[in-house]
Amino acid sequence: MKALMFGFYLLLAGSFSTKALAATSYIGDGQGPGDFALVSPAQQAQIVIDTQDHPGLLRAVQSLQQDIEKVSGVRLVQSAKPDQPLALIIGSLDKSRLLTTLEQRRKLDFSQLRGRWDGYQIELVQQPLPGVEQALVLAGNDKRGAIYAVYDLAEQIGVSPWVWWADVPVTKKSALWVKAGTRVLDAPKVKYRGIFLNDEAPALSSWVQEKFGGYNHKFYLHVFELLQRLKANFLWPAMWNNAFADDDPQNPLLADEMGIVMSNSHHEPMLRADKEWNRYGKGPWEYSSNKAELYKFWQQGAQRHKNLESIFTLGMRGQQDEPMKEGENIALLEQIVADQRQILSDTFGAAKLTQVPQVWALYKEVQGFYERGMRVPDDVTLLWADDNFGNLRRLPTAAERNRAGGAGVYYHFDYVGEPRSYRWINTVPLSKIWQQMDLAWRYGADRIWIVNVGDLKPMELPTDFFLRMAWDPERFNAGNLQQWTKDWATQQFGPGQAEVIAGLLQGYTKHNGRRKPEAIEPGTYSLLHYNEAERVSRELADLAQRSDQVQQQLGAAYQDAFVQLVAHPLKASQAVFEINRAVAMNQLHGQQGRASTNDWAAQAQFWFARDAELTAAYHALGGGRWNHLMSQPHLGYNYWNDPAQNQLPALLQRTTPPGADMGVMAEGAAFYWPESEYRQQPLALDTFYPDGQAERRIEVFNRGQTPFDFSANASADWIELSHSAGTVKQQQVIQVRVNWAKAADGLNQGEVQIKGIGWGGARVTVLANKAASGGSGYLDTDGYIALDGSSGSAERPQADARWQLLPGHGRGGGAMVATTKADYQPQSVSQAPYLQYPVYFQRAGEFELQLMLAPSLDFVPGSTLRLALALDDQEPVLLSTLTDRSNAAWQQGVLDGIRLVKSQLRVPSAGSHQLKIYLVDPGVVIERILINTGALKPSYLGPPVSPYRAQSSTTTKN
């Protein structure tokens, strides 16, 4: 069925309901004919629920009562029997006698609902019972389905799932009308959908201890309710120094009551927490030498959870999430799994063994056991994992998709480990999540989706997205992600500023997706080339300014939620970048002996203090409601692990001499005059081209305390200067341009002479190449052609394969994703779908082509993530983009957020050409394309997109 739906749901760029981010919106903005008055000035509905229904459902109904009262000011009356004209009937098919009666009276048909895991039906019924004129029925196939129906209604009337966890207010309404003809039938497509609270110290643990006294049922009540509101059903609990069932025996009982399926993390087998072994275990955590104690330890876990809905993790890793000390002993691990299965057989009965949910987490080195031939029984779910940085390592093959236990995915928004821990802030763009989890869905990993959310806050946005996508992956596609973000912003803050807020969310996550804040260093973004560091600074400053403008326009009730969900993560990310930029500038200016050296040190200190202020302001929200939750250290990394506290990098402090001392620097080089003279490194600007960079800068700076006057003179009339004289206290910038009308054809050479303090003065060479060009495409100027993945067009789409635009993703304006049905194999590369980029070359030659690709992995065994390159009608040349499988290459890729792949491109003639990239293997994501035609400079993001000239046009677009 998935294959048949491939073309449809890929092309659908649908939107979501802003009422509840749901497929169907059934709460009207006003009364219409036949509408149902949940609450109105004249009347309100009566809640009717069987007192013998599930206690977890009864608890959810109490919550719904409170939600309706928050919105309308009216608390609906609850009864076991309807005695009012309007009834809100709630129940589960397995417990509600009233639902049975309605079906027997043929007022409702539950045949499409019955048997659907976690499914629910919401339907408006006329005259369902004597004395009842109308009833809105919320029915669940099971306990969870009914609970989801309850919270679906709560969300539809305007209560965000983040009402408690992010202080999102409700909009007051005097009436709540359910549309006539309402009928909703829904059920999840992924069976188990959940989160992992992990790496929880110091932030979450300190908050939990202060507010609840520990990880007890009072805390988990709020976690469970959030999961219910997001229609999730699965949890790996906090485990760093905690043991869910042992810390508070009520924890697992409450989870079961509320319909939350419990397990323990990937390295905690048989529902025993790692810390329980520290508390009660005897001897070493080694099965080869301590089998009897471990066997008994696991028996106790099985017995404790015998009557609770759970998933048992099989296998074994070393303590504290490390590899087993026994090494990669497959025979031993097979014996461990066999013994664990025996424990489950003894506990539940041999006949029920295959019905007991079990999972084998193929995390890190454990996947190697599987790849070398280890297998588990067919009913055990295989839980594949990403590489801890959001890149799926493996997905099921066609044969594996036939396993009874199915497969799932363990994903990460948070991680502790090499090459750099990231635990502090949201760093994952929604487009990245969608692209990887869409692969998981299409390759049949649909049994479990679980994501490591760290402290949970501030991962609200990606957590919400991940769990909603788990409910129905086919509702999400590359074309509606931006709409989803806008709808999410609408739900939290109303429609007035939703589009701007969505841009803020996309903006800061795009920045963090380029490189995680913890991995940003002073040298990450170039100070010298393409104005890169300053461009990023301006982008973030613009986002921060727009955030302030939005916040000023929001009402008082929204202020705390806006800080938590938008302003804080945005501004905190900005602060980390600006600290590193200021340190880099301090180092550069210090090396050049500038008077401004100490000013940049002060800037670094300002932003360091700003980071602390932002943290303190967050902790002060609501009178300390979220104290400690932003206390994760994130500045001052020296290796993969986070520092004990935030640290500012070493800064240069300079004692500026009295008097004046001139220095001159040309754009693109760190050396300066007068040092350039005695090092015999003449100052020169990069060559100007008619369609290239319009301005280049010369900096005249002071190395002393006393201001001085300078003059600047061009040697030719085609060289234009922004100003020819001035006074320098610390720095003056001269922008240099070329008047092409006055320049001669071919190469022009001149210079700018700058005089000030000292003998002679500096000379800066200026070159301008007025070469004839008449073709079309992205132009070869300034020694390169730079393209975004989205700069081209997708040609020859097929029913089972296409290049798909992923707007706003990656380092450029948008990426292109090789999207196919599962197990796709091209019959002929030359006939495959391809991307086409019109390009114009100044000359013939063989040039280096650089592909900036997402650091995706070979989720299909044996794949090297191939594509094929061609120019015009040349025969496509296959290129494997995943050939270096070293740990060093992987580390570089996940730190940079890209895999840089280089190839040679032979250009037979100057002029216009078509660069073509053919789809060969699925999962390839093209973010940027750079062609070095002679002068490409090193930078992190690469230069801006090259100017484009349309056919039969003399104008270019920059």
Image: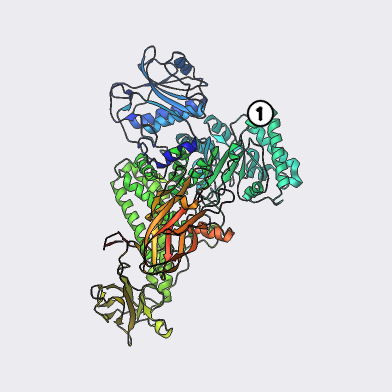
Q: Tell me the crowding category of disc 1: few under 14, some 14 to 19, or many 20 or more residues within 10 angstroms, Cα based.
A: few
741 vs 501, left or right, is left
* Residue reaching furthest to the top: 130
Regarding residue 16, the answer to whether it shows in the image is: yes
Residue 395 image-quadrant placement: top right
| Image vertical order of residue 826 relative to residue 253, above or below | below
In the picture provided, is 259 more to the left or to the right than 134? right
The percent coordinates of residue 139 (x first, y second) are: 45, 24
Residue visible at 29% across and 51% down?
A: 549
What residue is disc 1 on? 352
Counting the numbered discs, the total is 1
Query: Which of the two residues, 309 or 908, is positioned nearer the viewer here?
Result: 908
Residue 889 in the image: state x and y as whole percent.
55, 60
When the figure is inspected, residue 262 is found, relative to residue 425, above or below; the finding is: above
| Residue 938 in the image: above or below residue 922 | below
Where residue 323 appears, as percent x and y from the top left, is 65, 51
Q: In this orientation, which residue lies closer to the viewer: 239 or 179?
A: 179
* Type of amino acid at the residue the image marks with label 1: Lys
**Residue displayed at 37% across by 79% down:** 683
Q: Secondary structure at mark 1?
A: helix
Quarter of image, res 490:
top left
Does residue 464 appear to the left or right of 171 in the view shown? right
Q: Residue at x 71, y 49 (%)?
A: 329
User: Eyeballing the image, is 411 above or below 715?
Assistant: above
The answer to whether residue 459 is seen in the rendering is no
